[in-house]
Image: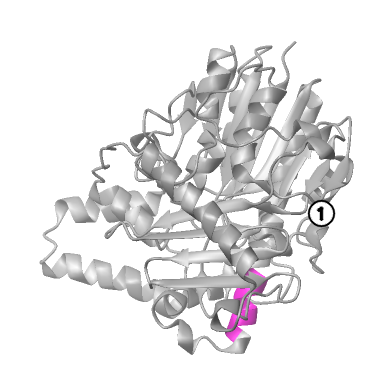
Amino acid sequence: MAQNVVLVTVDSLRADHVGCYGYDRDTTPELDAIAEDGHRFSAAFTHACATRPSFPAIMTSSHPLMYGGFERLSEERTLVSEVLSRQGYATGGFHSNLYLSAEFGYDRGFDTLYDSRADPSPMTRLRQAVKDNLDSDGLVYRILEKLYQGTERAAGVDVGSYYVSAEDITDRALEWVDAQGDRPTFLWVHYMDPHHPYSPPEEHQMFSDISRREGVRLRPKMMENDEDITEEELQTLIDLYDGEIRYTDAQIGRLLSTLEDEWDDWTAIVTADHGEEFRDHGEFFHQNRFYDEVMHVPLIVYDGDSSGTHDEMVGLMDVAPTAATLAGVETLPENFYGYPLDPLLDGRSEDWEREGVLGSWYDVPTGTERFAYRTTDWKYIRDYVHDNEELYDLQADPDEQSNLLDDDPEPDVLDEMRRVVDDLEEDIEATDTEVESVEMDDEIKERLRNLGYQE
């Protein structure tokens, strides 16, 4: 019987807030146990600094700016779901980030893709009904909109869910799995909860006595006047963020323990699309920058049979090839640019090919690009947005505070880092193609704005 494969992705989960990656808070007891019995990759990095560019790398094993970029998945990319569907797998995906919806190409290869597009929260539906049925210049509309915004800002009341909760996503995924019978199964579950606003359920807010309402109240301040966030408020936000991680961890544990009871032969891959910044470099959220608080993510592979800790550099483009090979795919698509993790999982580290991880992103309105290349010892950033370069010695400066290009960097290192990024730019140019943009209706735009995205 073919092996069942589960891919769990968590939005905005930075590695250094996970217990098995050294965090001193008990945020992730379930993940820690999975890592203890499985394979933990200590040097796993995403290829982009936000959800939209990160997921093409995760799901199609290609650089974010290849094939016309990340506005919509080009037909020239191949999703891992398409590969496994052709292998005879039942394929199901469950999440509530609308940038990963069918409109953006993420339904390809899935028998079932729940993306919450047709099932928004009651408050979202109510707000949209108001927009659809009332004149936006009218007095009633303005009063209702002001009431909604004022409630969030002043009282911190969570007046509408911006995404579907981890518990609900888990319920939906398990119900779907139960209906597949004995078919080999590929399941993708993406949890949004550590993404702002940070408002964990009370039973999981165990790191302070701050109400979850406080996170909702502080969110507009973070987004609009972040320089006014006090040190006390910063700690409050971190406490709430950690509570969201603890809640999500509990649901991951419930998902995987249930599957373990139902399946005999299976593998789980758990990772995150990117991290989250808490003023590490002066900002909040994930501001399209290539520092490690955003780029360093957890990556755990669990199969119940083997375990290990791996310090080799790995990237999230390696996830799809790994899932495919675990499912018995013998020939990977030519447009997969990552590597299966098999050599590391099998103890053959001498056969591992990756020396570093490349990152890429562009500003959607202008198309202006940023690139990064990270090895064990060095990080290089090429920023066309600000016409700037950065180089960090990660052994001497792990917090990336001293840009060596302001001084006198080692020329051989800089030349090599520049060459690798030059090669990536050439590869992006060689795969360039026209991708039709997505026309988002007002409901989608509203829900994405509630999550802080700017379409």
Please state which of residues 91 and 434 is positioned toward the viewer in this rendering: 434
Helix, strand or loop for the magenta stretch, by majority: helix
Which of the 4 image quarters holds residue 349? Answer: top right
If the image is split into quadrants, where does the C terminus sit? Answer: bottom left
The x, y position of residue 204, in whole percent, is 70, 61
Q: Residue furthest front?
A: 412
Type of colouring: one colour
Which x, y percent locates residue 167?
A: 62, 45
Question: Taking 194 as reference, is 124 left or right?
Answer: left
Kind of residue at disc 1: Pro
Please give the range of residues in magenta. Answer: 233-240
Evaluate whether residue 318 shows in this view: yes
Under tag 1, what secondary structure?
Answer: helix
| The quarter of the displayed image where residue 105 is located | top left
Residue in view at x 80 percent, y 52 percent: 311
Residue matched to label 1: 29
Residue at left 75%, top 59%?
18
Q: Quadrant of the N terminus?
A: top right
* Number of on-image labels: 1
Residue 77, quarter of picture:
top left
- Say above or below: 158 vs 337: below
Is residue 234 inside the magenta stretch?
Answer: yes
88 displayed left or right of 222 = right
Between 30 and 105, which is closer to the camera in this rendering? 105
- Please report the residue visible at 80 percent of the width from the left and 47 percent of the height from the top: 40
